[in-house]
Image (spheres, coloured by chain):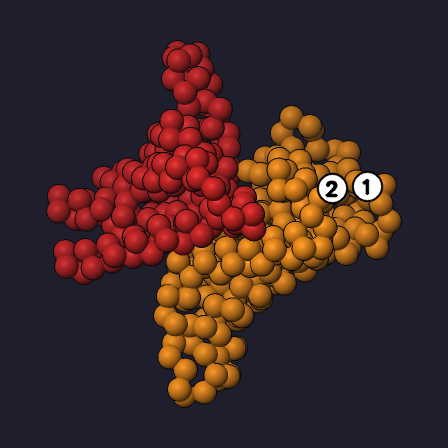
Amino acid sequence: MNIDLVWIFISAMVVNNFTLFYFLGLCPFMGVSGRVATALRMGAADTFVLLITALVTWVLDTFVLPHAPYLTLISFIVTIASVVQIVEMAIKKYSPRLFHELGQFLPLITTNCAILYLAIFQTNRGYGFLEGLSFALGAGAGLTLALVLMASIREQVDLSRIPDVAEGSALIFLIAGFLSLAFMGFAGLLSAGS
Amino acid sequence: MAARTAKEDLVRGIWRENPVFVQLLGLCPALAVTNTVANGLAMGLATGFVAISSSIFISALRKVIPHGVRISTYVLIVGTFVTVVDLFMQATVPRVSQALGAFVYLIVVNCMILSRHEMFASKSPVWRSVLDAAGTSAGFLLALLLMGGIRELFSSGSLLGVDLLGPRFQPWLVMALPPGGFFTIAFILLGMNAWHRRREPRRVRKLMHDPVGSGAMS
């Protein structure tokens, strides 16, 4: 049981990394990967929203969706968006400093496909409460890892001379390709473990 | 933007303001489901249906929807049509539906669709919103087909299952895997950069600094 939780975490973090394996959350990946400090904050905010999503999904899966399966998608978006909004307001009131660190990213994250994907994945695989939390933590750690790696590389790239044609997003995609290639090396980890 | 002609509404999304290659919107599906042409085609058509039908609704209701909750309203309307597409695909083409998996659901958070609603359908009459959504969807479909074509051709030597490169072709497996998606779009963008640079050096530099034109990425 506990071993399973660890494997779910590792699988979501490196083997099936959300950004580099499933292409989820690419917009923030391109947008806020300029600086390591920002990337870390974004990753933290991501993980936070993913955890809330896992909780909400578990509640919906257990109590609501068995009765109305056709509402899956709509109930996920509506509840996740509103819960994130409420949490955002709560943080703003009780911890302005944390809000300053995470707050600006929270509304953006709600429309991040990684969030919805987590909810759907959790439902399809029939994860329970703890498994869902472990999955969310792993996914968040994976997103943070990818963001920070990309930001560290881009900070170096800023200082180097690059060919004219590679300016802008083309180069970011190229770097992402190599990162993704490197992460494929983790694929053996999962089969060795299961 | 709405001051342009109706023909312009339809045409500009296809290439000059292509959602994927120029505006960098809707990247997740563009990379995730383009390992074969067939998947790209199905995804493009499904997204197009959702974009056009939700544009009709949003444009028709644009005076009724309160400004403060407009995004949530858009998402609800889009979500309804995505559910329709998903159920339709499960019933008629179960194999395609399985291949696309959860990415059919993810149409709902496709920033390309939301950006068209926010920037166009919410301010324009119904028929022009339809043209705009159709043009943008056609550009999206074109991008998916191009990506899917390149990736399928190199990864298996075939297009739509038809063998093209002969038995001596050594499959380039990585093109069907995730890194292949990143590399394909990177090389398409590199090619476009080079082409633009040769044609109009000055305009490109402006585009480079603000590729979206409005910063409407979510």
Residue depicted at x 42% and y 23% = A102
Secondary structure of the residue carrying numbered label 1:
loop
Corner quadrant of residue A177: bottom left
User: Disc 1 marks which amino acid?
Assistant: Ala
Residue name at image x 84 percent, y 55 percent = B7
Looking at the picture, does residue A93 appear above or below residue B177?
A: above
- Output the chain of dot 1: B
Q: Tell me the distance, in whole angstroms, between the alpha carbons under discs 2 and 1.
A: 7 Å
Residue B22 place in picture, x, y as percent:
63, 50
Whichever of labels 2 and 1 marks the residue nearer the N terminus, that label is 1
Determine the colour of chain B: orange
The residue at the far bottom in this view is B167
Looking at the image, is A175 positioned above or below residue B43? above
Residue in the picture at 19% in, 55% down: A189
- In the figure, the shade used to draw chain A is red
Residue B213 is drawn in which quadrant?
A: top right
Q: In which quadrant of the rendered image does the C terminus of chain A lie? A: bottom left
- Badge 1 crowding class, 10 Å Cα cut-off, few under 14, some 14 to 19, many 20 or more, is some
User: Residue A112 bears which disc, if any?
Assistant: none
Q: In the image, residue B30 lies at what x, y percent?
A: 52, 56
Dot 2, how many residues are within 10 Å of its Cα: few (below 14), some (14-19), or many (20+)?
Answer: many
Left or right of A131? Residue A99 is right
Task: Determine whether the residue tagged by mark 2 lies in a helix, strand or loop.
Answer: helix
Residue at label 1? B2
Subunit that carries the residue with mark 2: B
